[in-house]
Amino acid sequence: MMTGVDIHHVPYRGAALALTDLLNGQVQVIVAAPLSGAIGYVRAGQIRALAVTNRTRSEMLPEVPTVGEFVPGFEATGFFGVGAPKNTPAEVVNKLNSEINAGLADAKIKARLADVGNTALAGTPAEFRKLIADETEKWGKVVKFAGIKPE
């Protein structure tokens, strides 16, 4: 959408199958998401990382550029988060948030996440709501542009 490049999308039932086909030469390029599934192959020299889709370079692969360095404004990241039912009391949400953020600040947890190519992103419930809203808007535009319809 941002470059006008026309590539053929081959849907896979997971990154492992796509990586297998890449390793066997059945496909020439994949977007491996999450990075944790491919990083071992990159480190072993079995595949070459061309770029990361994060806004900033990966701490695990600092020599690999971001797509945004070639396509200004490009960013495609995934995230995991914790949610609670809508009417959960604020004190419960705040306690969960505090404990989760404390865990994400732990050096061992940060190191383990980094080891598999992930970054801890602590924050507030309001920041997480904004992230979800922003990502929904961004990807909604992509879905509309591509004419994607539910099956």
Image (cartoon, helix red, strand yellow):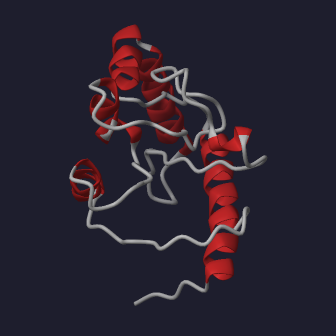
Outermost residue to the top:
107
Q: Residue at x 44, y 34 (%)?
A: 96
Q: Residue at x 60, y 28 (%)?
A: 57
- Vertical placement of 98 versus 129: above or below? above
Say which quarter of the image contains residue 146: bottom right
> Is 48 situated left or right of 125 in this image?
left
Q: Nearer the viewer, residue 25 or 12?
A: 25
Q: Nearer the viewer, residue 8 or 132?
A: 8
Q: Quadrant of the C terminus?
A: bottom left
> Is 102 situated left or right of 73 in this image?
left
> Is 113 situated left or right of 101 in this image?
left
Q: Quadrant of the N terminus?
A: bottom right
Residue 5: image x %, image y %? 65, 67
> Is 44 situated left or right of 60 in this image?
left
Residue 25: image x %, image y %? 27, 55
- Vertical placement of 11 versus 23: above or below? below
Q: Residue at x 45, y 21 (%)?
A: 60
Residue 106: image x %, image y %? 41, 12
Residue 52: image x %, image y %? 54, 39
